[in-house]
Image (cartoon, coloured by chain):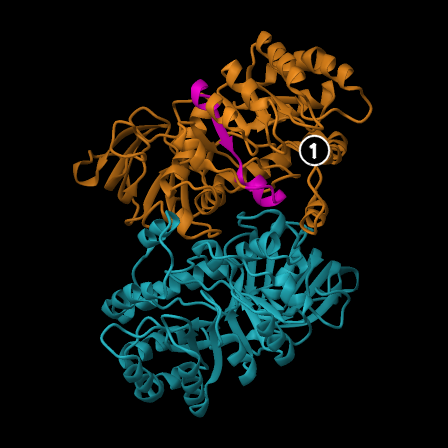
Chain colours: A cyan, B orange
Amino acid sequence: MSVLITGIGELVTNDPEREGLLGLVEDAAVVVEGSTVAWVGPAAEAPAADTAYDAGGRAVVPGWVDSHSHLVFAGDRAQEFAARMTGEPYSAGGIRTTVAATRAATDEQLTSHVARLVAEMRAQGTTTIEIKSGYGLSVHDEARSLAVARQFTDETTFLGAHVVPADTTPEEYVELVTGPMLEAAAPHARWIDVFCEDGAFDVDQARTILAAGTDNGLRGRLHANQLTYGGGVRLAAELGLVAVDHCTYLTDDDVSALADSGTIATLLPGVEFSTRHPYVDARRLLDAGVRVALASDCNPGSCFTSSLAFCVALAVRDMGMSPAEAVHAATAMGAAALDRDDVGVLAVGKRADLVLLDAPSYLHLAYRPGVPLVAGVWQGGRPVAPGPVA
Amino acid sequence: MSVLITGIGELVTNDPEREGLLGLVEDAAVVVEGSTVAWVGPAAEAPAADTAYDAGGRAVVPGWVDSHSHLVFAGDRAQEFAARMTGEPYSAGGIRTTVAATRAATDEQLTSHVARLVAEMRAQGTTTIEIKSGYGLSVHDEARSLAVARQFTDETTFLGAHVVPADTTPEEYVELVTGPMLEAAAPHARWIDVFCEDGAFDVDQARTILAAGTDNGLRGRLHANQLTYGGGVRLAAELGLVAVDHCTYLTDDDVSALADSGTIATLLPGVEFSTRHPYVDARRLLDAGVRVALASDCNPGSCFTSSLAFCVALAVRDMGMSPAEAVHAATAMGAAALDRDDVGVLAVGKRADLVLLDAPSYLHLAYRPGVPLVAGVWQGGRPVAPGPVA
């Protein structure tokens, strides 16, 4: 069964074989066959298909690839957020509030909560989602968090090393994370991650935990330099990790290390928005040759946005990215940050993840901040979100 | 025909007879009869009604009252926006680009464009909208702009004095605005407004234009101190206008004048977002006793957001408002800025404009920035937006 999507006023392909960063095609069409893209090009040259959909001159972009989220949790920290807005600083310790609520929740409660957030993201055009554990912090609760996450995505990340739980010493906890917890978690996870930060885990602990993960078949990623300067980013570069996330506080040496290693800096502007930390100067990174991705970091503590369009608007307003760079960072670079080449790009053979915008150009994602512009979403070729695409 | 809306986890009433700024009621219910609110209180005490709707524990807030928008226009300035983000400053002169496109559009094109934006706003929970002219700048085009706007709202504002068109002297244009243009516009308008700013109209011109409007039965409002310091805000206070909008550059004397006059300062944080001007310190105004409203300023040049939830999130993050103050400013104070007491408040006899949030608390409007949280909208008692309320 093939579908011709025609009348696309502006198509963002991210195809490196086309011109410009976004590989734009005007007056475009896409043919979807099953779950993949079968043809991309000017509408006037499009082949026939079993059915046709007219985009009416609107823009189409690849589905967002959100490479950093923490969706498996229970409870609400809206009051903590409100207190922070009156001047209380954000600290990693707040994570423990969510841990207590998550442990108390049933599997069904956790699953339905994740389902709700995944549906919310999909309706906003996110078609690939990485989901971390990290609010269980016990062997049982980390394993079940990942089992829940795995129902929704293959991109699951074991983040037992999110914070040291209240009733354990750091030494004991690292032993647990690298031993029985890792063993229980690994079957449900693709990645292993560590929150490398003052108040969480130091560089040596992060190195130990990532090494144990690698030995158990997981690939490493890292939360680093979110709240303070530190060695996390340089560790990520040294280990050649595919991505290191946050990167809020970077020295020139950190920037050089990222540029030299090719490790992607995944920036999470929603966190800066919701904690009032300074926005990352993405321009500095891009100009130094660092590869930059954008993700939501959707979580109940430091950033409860699920909107990558919002992150794109912030990146343009406050981080020195052009609209094209920001859209690319939240699609193609998000995919690269997950070491994926089947998503984030609209080209023949890639997964048919398309977002129809109620706008003539991707520029409107930054030009119209806060406005829900998604008119339809195809995920793996299937229409999945409400709107004109039904 | 009466409807009982019950199971409201948290109800924002803005009713001054209830406790706190927002007059919150927990575990609440509302009875709607026809187009108005017939009962508000704890769900356990609610009277019977013809039909019932269960809000499922979610929060309900009054519909947004957006007291400042420029929806009657044609054309797109996304490229100008993108250029501005790379460093080009915003200037009032860009308005002329939209004037040319608006004059070239047919009545039908203008009407369908406004209809689209009004529907977009309503789906986001805006149930009262002020709409200005100001992209016609000829007798014919200002009158037809207002006639188009009047199809969608009673809150129409004649803004012939938006900028001086290219082919006229300021003196000639003020004569036109206060003479034949005002005469043609007045039957379609409730308000008269002037863009009092360097590059637009000075204080003396604004005074003359507002006086002419008042003589023709219109009530005055003002764009002032948006791009530079100036006398506009003090003029608004001196004239006792109900509201003066923007207020980005304020001296201490301006603040005192606002506090003394009771003129509402309508802040438009989307403009600061999209032009990179500094955010207004709303805390300074509130602490000085100034009444503050929030509105979108939805327009193609300086700010093309239509989302008051986005404005609320910015006000909390960047302007020193609490979530409660920001929500109040975009509802009850928006109504006050239009001198309306039938909207912006959920109390017996008020218009039944309710927004059901996909969230347990109004706090989520700031806690979850960029996320479309509207699950349903009732406008004048009728369900008008997609979502669970159908």
Residue type pointed to by label 1 = Ala
In this rendering, the answer to whether A154 lies above or below A94 is: below
Q: Residue furthest bottom?
A: A215
Q: Is residue A154 visible?
A: yes
Q: Position of residue B390 (x, y in %)?
A: 41, 44
Q: Is residue B117 magenta?
A: no
Q: Is residue A297 left or right of residue B247?
A: left
The part of the image, by quadrant, that contains residue B236 is top right
On the question of residue B359 being in view, the answer is no
In this rendering, position of residue B331 left or right of residue B29: right
User: Where does residue A365 sit, x and y in percent of width and height?
Assistant: 60, 52
What segment is highlighted magenta in the picture? B258-278
What's the chain of the residue with tag 1?
B
Q: Which residue is label 1 attached to?
A: B92
- Taking the view exactly as shown, the residue that stands out farthest to the right is B167
What kind of element bears circle 1?
Answer: helix
Characterize the local packing of mark 1: few (<14), some (14-19) or many (20 or more) Cα atoms within 10 angstroms.
some
Front position in the image: B383 or A144: A144
> Is residue B264 shown in magenta?
yes
The image shows a total of numbered marks equal to 1
Instruction: Tell me: residue B354, above or below residue B318.
Output: above
Q: Position of residue B10 (x, y in %)?
A: 28, 43
Q: Which quadrant holds the N terminus of chain B?
A: top left
- Give x and y (percent) for residue B172: 78, 15
Q: Residue at x 44, y 76 (%)?
A: A156
- In depth, the one of B263 and B191 nearer the eye is B263
A91 vs B40, left or right, is right
